[in-house]
Amino acid sequence: MAKADTVRKRAPLKIRRPPVGASPGTLIADPAARRSELRLTLISPEKFKTIDNASIDELNAHCEKWPVVWLDCTGLANIPLIEEIGRIFNLHPLALEDVVNTGQRPKVDFFEDHAFVVMRMIDDVTAHRYEQIAVFFGKNFVVTFQEREGDPFDPVRKRIAASMPNRLRSRGADYLAYALIDAIVDSYFPPIEAAGEVVDGIEDQMLNTPHKHQMRQLHELRRDANVLKGVLWPMRDALATLIRNDVPFVKAATKIFFNDTLDHSLRLIELVENQRDMLTGLIEMHLSLTQARTNDVISYLTIVSVIFMPLTFLVGVWGMNFEPESSPWNMPELKAYYGYPAALLLMLVVAVGLVAFFRWKKWL
């Protein structure tokens, strides 16, 4: 959680587009894009093989020999390499254009022999940085493009390496694509649940003592929830589109699993919506508590002022310049032996009487 005097900086969401009038399918690399590296995973029911820092020659040599090929491209700086991957797997050029122009809305597009899925995953929770990940899959291949290192795919890789029976090595490319997409969706649960715990902690603190820094934290959390909402809703629509369409490279048995991923996305949306509602309520409660505390302070100050008003009047009267010897009406009590304690006693009686009156009126 950010400190009260620290403003969290967010990585801006930059959407790079080709120049106006450029030919459709034009690929232009972001100058800040990372160097492209390939990781090739070859899968069959009996065995698997992983090649780190793979080359195009290795891809061509193994592509036709294995039932399922998963190519993971990390970094989008090498445009010729991305174009060559598109040529090998016959990927649509408009989809490849969306791969390098990061910041796309989550969606699903279907082409003749493959599907194209754009997702967003949380790349850095503390910096609130999102990363686009593109997934192509067809009858016997899955190709993923991500902007930089780091992804939620390690559990999938471990499942591929597990001993038989192994559904990831026997159910085909569409099931592998499901596993990868499901991992992306499920990666949202930990940060959203952690944010919920932070919200609960702020609520407990507010009920004890509201502070100014809590308002900043609440606004930051609500802004985070709005960003998540903008990501999760189109992700849900994309998953629903993936389930509804009838294409030969997505088997009916796999759609059942995609439907489970859709349920996960709906659950995430519910969590975010509940957090937004709770944050809105906490912001309103913070304003109410702050206003009530201010009203209490003003009330106490007003009561103290009212108590001292008659005392100030009495002191002011006795503090005037009188000459008792010139007239019997000229404050003769100034000559009284017990005049000073009598004056103090009178002021005490007035103060106590006012306090008793305020309590009788239930103002205290």
Image: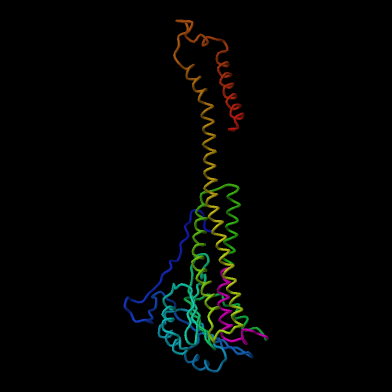
Counting the numbered discs, the total is 0
**What sort of colour scheme is used for the picture?**
rainbow
Vertical comparison of 137 with 195: above or below = below
What residue sits 47% from the left and 17% below the top?
A: 319
Front residue (pair 25, 27): 25
Q: Quadrant of residue 92?
A: bottom left
What residue sits 48% from the left and 75% below the top?
A: 107
Image coordinates for residue 140, horizontal then vertical, percent: 54, 89
Predominant secondary structure, magenta span: helix
Q: Quadrant of the C terminus?
A: top right
Vertical comparison of 222 with 28: above or below = above
Residue at the farthest left position? 21
Q: Is residue 135 magenta?
A: no
Front residue (pair 113, 180): 113
What residue sits 55% from the left and 15% below the top?
A: 340
Vertical comparison of 321 with 246: above or below = above
What residue sits 60% from the left and 71% below the top?
A: 263
Asked whether, in this view, residue 328 is left or right of residue 30, the answer is right
Q: Is residue 166 magenta?
A: yes
Image coordinates for residue 274, horizontal then vertical, percent: 57, 60
Image coordinates for residue 217, horizontal then vertical, percent: 52, 55
Image coordinates for residue 109, horizontal then vertical, percent: 47, 80
Q: Quadrant of the N terminus?
A: bottom right
Q: Which stretch is magenta?
A: 165-189
